[in-house]
Amino acid sequence: MSEPLRIGVPSKGRLAELATELLVDAGLKFRRQNRDLFARVKPSFGLEQPIDVTFLRTDDIPVLCAEGAIDLGITGSDLVAEAGVDEPAPDRPAIVTQLKLGLGGCRLAVCVPESSPVVSATDLKGDRIATSFPNVTRRYLNQSGVTGHIVELTGSVEVMIALGIADAIVDLVETGSTLAANKLRILDTIGTYETVLVQNPATKHEALCAQIVRRCEGVVIARGYSLLEYNVPEEQLAAAEKITPGFSSPTVNRLEQPGWYAVRAMVKRGDVIGAMERLEELGAQAILEIEIKNCRL
Ligand SMILES: Nc1ncnc2c1ncn2[C@@H]1O[C@H](COP(=O)(O)OP(=O)(O)OP(=O)(O)O)[C@@H](O)[C@H]1O
Ligand SMILES: O=P(O)(O)OC[C@H]1O[C@H](OP(=O)(O)OP(=O)(O)O)[C@H](O)[C@@H]1O
Ligand SMILES: [Mg+2]
């Protein structure tokens, strides 16, 4: 039998459940037993070839994908940047980001104490900067012409200034509550990141990778949209279509009742309630939001 395609997903941490849920919603049936390091995907209609899901550390997934140990992987784009595998190296190609999952959004920020007089990163010359992202930090310092000393750590970075071993930190910020709790403020943002599906371009399973990527894409788009259905009088149809232009265009059908139309359109999840209010103001009726579980567009 041919070698299985391997998909690397985080074994623990905040991305573990999200990654597994995405693959399950994309129709990959597997179950992790206890703390097993891999699970075989059960063959199903249209997906009969052998596939293994391997459970790995989130921060190892970029390099394991670049080295070809896994064909596809789910991880943070910050970790891809830190591993430097989004750039080609003499002995391996750059990994390809096939899909942004619209989850796990965060940014890497240079932070200093709230009370610090420092106004720009260039003021950090010679300072000690604690981070678990030494490579991204080094690139940023070089680009900004700053010669800081990097103190490399694997966690609890925000406490390092209070411990007296750093003057500034570079760490991930999502809500900002960890910074606030540690009385720190953002001096500069190095980059914004999210969870991504990455692929080794030299995979031996190109067609199967493309099929899995396409399945995941269907789920990601479906999660971002709802279907809005409503009835609208003819004189308001054009205005209603402007509110719900759809993914490519709305579907419009004449109703039995003269002068009325039924409209169906995909609307971004975050815009649904606002669109419903505006449609109601226009005189639309029977406005329904319908959840899309999956799609191909
Ligand atoms: N608030 C956040 N803090 C850290 N990482 C975040 C945050 N929001 C999203 N992420 C993403 O999650 C990744 C961290 O995943 P990881 O598997 O290390 O989870 P974790 O919950 O931080 O686990 P651990 O307890 O081992 O630190 C980051 O690289 C980033 O892409
Ligand atoms: O802006 P916020 O919403 O507060 O999130 C950012 C914090 O969350 C992460 O820590 P995590 O919970 O992963 O703990 P760790 O440092 O042990 O990895 C990250 O390293 C920051 O400390
Ligand atoms: Mg963490």
Image (cartoon, rainbow, N blue to C red):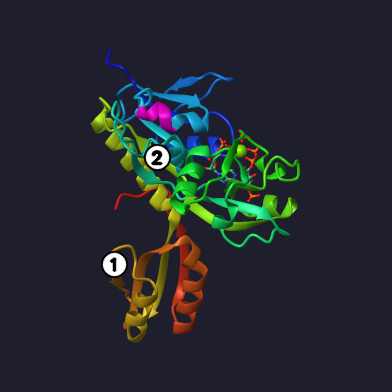
Image coords of residue 193 (percent x, y): 48, 49
User: Relative to residue 129, is residue 3 depicted above or below?
Assistant: above
Residue identified by numbered label 1: 249
Q: Quadrant of ligand 1?
A: top right
Amino acid type for the residue under numbered disc 2: Leu
Q: Residues within 10 Å of mark 1 (few under 14, many from 20)?
A: few
First along the sequence among labels 1 and 2 = 2
Side (left or right) of 90 relative to 27: left
Image coords of residue 66 (percent x, y): 36, 29
Which residue is more in the foreground, 14 or 60? Answer: 60
- In the picture, residue 26 is in which quadrant? top left
- For the point 73% across and 50% down, which residue is it? 182
- In reply to whether residue 63 is colored magenta, the answer given is yes
Task: State how far apart marks 1 and 2 are (Cα).
Answer: 28 Å
Residue at the far bottom: name it.
235
- For the point 38% across and 22% down, which residue is it? 69
Which residue is more in the foreground, 154 or 245? Answer: 154
- In reply to whether residue 175 is colored magenta, the answer given is no
Image coords of residue 137 (percent x, y): 51, 44
Question: How many numbered marks are there?
Answer: 2
Label ID, residue 289? none
Residue identified by numbered label 2: 197
Amino acid type for the residue under numbered disc 1: Ser
Side (left or right) of 252 relative to 269: left
Would residue 197 be visible to someone looking at this image?
A: yes
* Secondary structure mostly taken by the magenta-highlighted segment of the chain: helix
Read off the magenta span: 62-66
